[in-house]
Amino acid sequence: MAVYAYKGIDRASKAKKGVVDADSDRAARQKLKSDGIFPSFLKETSVSGSSRADEKGAAQKRVSTNQLAIATRQLATLVAAGMPLIDALKALADQLDNARFRAVISEVTDRVNEGATLANAMKEYPKVFPKIFVNMVASGEATGGLDLVLERLADLLETQAALQRKVLSAMAYPVLMLLLCSGVIMILLTFVVPEITKVFQSQKAVLPFPTRAVIFISQFLSTYWWAFVLIGIAGVLFFRSYGKTPAGRWRLDSLKLKLPLIGSISLKICSSRFARNLGTLLASGVELLTALAIVKNIIGNVVLEKIVEDSAEGVREGKSLAAELKRGGKFPKLLVHMCGVGEQSGQLDSMLLRAATAFESEVDTIISSLTSILEPVLIVVLAGIVGCILAAVMLPMLEMSQLGAR
């Protein structure tokens, strides 16, 4: 089955465009006409088989958390309004701007139309629909509450996307200032200072130590700038490859949890992700051991993932989840306490969601405070560096002018 891009009009004479899956050009036209669309343009955009799977694998990487959240919210609204699932999926595909994502939804629609469950159809696209997404949809289909499950999924994805945006936006300004001021310093050292040095050399002046130090750094950077570039590239490549090995990732993730301030933020983000996802799965009717097996793979830190894996083994043996998490010694005490209260009251899902909200609020507060402090500190430090360079350059000029005046 191939994918065809089309343009045409519907029965209301409104322009339509999108993609449709069919075995042939003729089948695609018949399928569009059965949907009330009369194509004026039709062209195959992909082929069946392994090459198509590869294309969809690439398409899956282009679907962001925010895009999936919006699509899930739209699908939940359509299903809650009483629209049949097939029609809801077709309507969703028509609303999507991402052509590749639209192709995936069209394929899912065809699979459902052929008799597959929505969860099984989505399962074929693991990079578009994560395991937690598929399991929650399966639970919603089994209980008849698909619209409620989709609403929970939309809430979960929107919360994750919002947290990502907060972290990125909080770091954007300091990073921009760092790059800008670093560029100014590099320009001073590689272009301005060498020109002024020529004046000093022509005058055969005796230079003070700060000026000699700045000139040395300037000459070193001008001569060996390529070495810094190579070292930077090599460092990035090394850490990327090292982080992909089991031992390397374990050491790096352990270091993340031990670093001052960054470790606290990283732990709270991972704890929030664990609590939010586990609570959402449990609220959707997924069994605890199954939920732990799913959540273990999306925490984002192998040290904490190992604790969750060991905790799942303890729960399987009849032990308390709170006690097992406490034994791991890494998760915050608040999370352990909330798990204990939830297990005793039979409301583990709601306690986990409350814990996730608390962690997210803490992360937001810490990042906001850190950003407000980091911005002026960064400006002062970089301004001080620039000031020292200028002072080192101006110092011999002042001495030379004083000697000339005498």
Image (cartoon, rainbow, N blue to C red):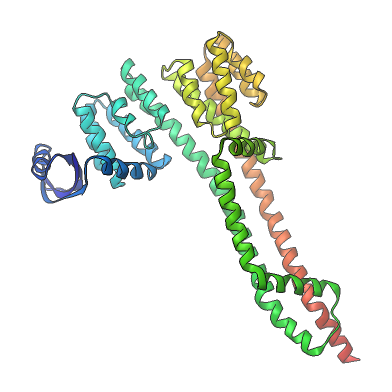
Q: Position of residue 45 (x, y in %)?
A: 22, 49
For the point 59% across and 12% down, the residue is 320
Closer to the camera in the image, 127 or 162:
127
Residue 302: which quarter of the image?
Answer: top right
For the point 38% across and 41% down, the residue is 67
Quarter of the picture containing the N terminus is top left
Q: Position of residue 145 (x, y in %)?
A: 33, 19
Q: Position of residue 270 (x, y in %)?
A: 57, 32
| 134 to the left or right of 162 | left
| 12 to the left or right of 244 | left
Residue 333: which quarter of the image?
Answer: top right
Q: Is residue 251 visible?
A: yes
Q: Is residue 338 above or below residue 366?
A: above
Quarter of the picture containing the C terminus is bottom right
Closer to the camera in the image, 223 or 253:
223
For the point 75% across and 86% down, the residue is 199
Q: Is residue 286 above or below residue 175?
A: above
